[in-house]
Image: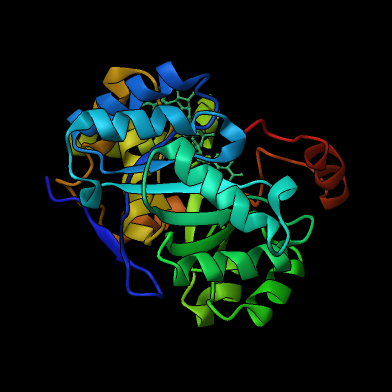
């Protein structure tokens, strides 16, 4: 199996495929899913302070016996940790929870609070060798352009909702000149049945001897986005990475592009998000 890598705008190479651990409750279950994934060949985990399971990720990395340099860990700072000076302290706590000397990719999770102050601290963490690459998540308002303009280190990735029903074609154009690449969250629509059962996926799954989810994940890979479907099911974990031995034709890619409805699964206005998400403060 030849996994693919994306070279980021800072020169670092990220495995294009990984495991997301959002909504995996607790460190023990997270560790178990990560261990399954490492055994299946995964080398990239996407977590966040807000998921409250970074310790499980760190424990799996240690116990896997795989050298740290072979594994890519992404985690995310919550707005309650934003602010010049304050964010540096939050990064140190993250390193301790993950039980590691460095974070491969650190993201600002949401576009609220003192994100510019936080970004300055992220840049300092890169200079200090505590973080290799830095990026952002959910910046889709005019705050995206503000951050892109003010940043000394331009974000390497922008992690947003992206799947065949919501393909982020405009956003890709907005970030292209910065060399920032899209990471897809809800890559398989959070398991949405209507998406998974689209006729085109069933037809292509039959043609290639794959399942519908594998067709969607292969489409993401060929679109150049970075993808990390969540699963705790060992069969799904095995299947999801088994997408590097076939290729969709350009005509098939176009048929999947035609499914774009411009419809999100996560539907909240910026104001609603700010009110709802700012109320949450993750525990250390
Ligand atoms: N930055 C952000 O704000 C943000 C927001 C959301 C997500 N994310 C990141 O993106 C990752 C992925 O998003 P997500 O977890 O919300 O959604 P997702 O990966 O699109 O979907 C996960 C769902 O699909 C199911 N599933 C996985 N593989 C399957 C398969 N082969 N066949 C059938 N069902 C399958 C999973 O159930 P099983 O466990 O039973 O397999 C789970 O219910 C997250 O884990 C997180 O790392 C980031």
- Picture layout, residue 269 above or below residue 27: below
Q: What is the x, y in percent for residue 168?
A: 58, 59
Q: Quadrant of residue 45?
A: top left
- Image check: 130 left or right of 265? left
Is any part of residue 165 visible from this angle?
no
- Image check: 234 left or right of 176? left
Q: What is the x, y in percent for residue 170?
A: 61, 68
Q: Specify the farthest residue to the left.
A: 1
* Front position in the image: 45 or 198: 45
Query: Which quadrant holds the N terminus?
Result: top left
* Front position in the image: 65 or 267: 65
Q: What is the x, y in percent for residue 248?
A: 26, 52
Residue that appears at 14% across and 45% down? 245
The colouring scheme, among rainbow, by chain, secondary structure or one colour, is rainbow
Query: Which quadrant holds the C terminus?
Result: top right
* Front position in the image: 7 or 51: 51
Q: What is the x, y in percent for residue 160?
A: 58, 52
- Picture layout, residue 210 above or below residue 115: above
Number of marks:
0
- Image check: 57 left or right of 192? left
Is any part of residue 4 visible from this angle?
yes
Residue that appears at 27% across and 26% down? 35
Residue that appears at 46% across and 45% down? 95
* Front position in the image: 4 or 154: 154
- Image check: 175 left or right of 55? right
Residue that appears at 17% across and 47% down? 246
């Amino acid at each position: 199996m030849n996994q693919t890598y994306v070279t980021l705008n800072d020169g670092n190479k990220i495995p294009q495929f990984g495991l997301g651990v959002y909504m995996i409750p607790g460190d023990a279950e997270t560790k178990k899913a990560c261990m399954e994934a490492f055994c299946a060949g995964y080398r990239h985990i996407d977590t966040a302070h807000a998921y409250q399971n970074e310790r499980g990720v760190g424990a799996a990395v240690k116990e896997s016996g795989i050298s740290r340099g072979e594994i890519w860990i992404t985690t995310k700072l919550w707005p309650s940790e934003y602010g010049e000076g304050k964010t540096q302290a939050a990064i140190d706590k993250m390193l301790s929870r993950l039980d590691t000397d460095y974070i491969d990719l650190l993201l600002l999770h949401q576009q609220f609070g003192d994100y510019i102050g936080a970004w300055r601290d992220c840049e300092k963490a890169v200079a200090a060798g505590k973080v290799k690459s830095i990026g952002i998540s959910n910046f889709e308002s005019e705050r995206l352009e503000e951050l892109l303009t003010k940043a000394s280190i331009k974000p390497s990735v922008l992690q947003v909702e992206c799947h065949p029903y919501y393909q982020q074609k405009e956003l890709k154009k907005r970030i292209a000149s910065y060399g920032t690449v899209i990471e897809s969250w809800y890559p398989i629509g959070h398991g949405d049945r209507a998406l998974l059962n689209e006729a085109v996926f069933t037809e292509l799954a039959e043609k290639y001897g794959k399942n519908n989810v594998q067709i969607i994940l292969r489409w993401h890979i060929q679109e150049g986005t970075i993808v990390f479907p969540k699963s705790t099911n060992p069969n799904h974990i095995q299947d999801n990475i088994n997408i590097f031995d076939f290729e969709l034709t350009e005509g098939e890619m176009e048929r999947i592009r035609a499914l774009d409805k411009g419809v999100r699964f996560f539907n909240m206005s910026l104001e609603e998000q700010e009110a709802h998400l700012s109320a949450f403060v993750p525990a250390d």
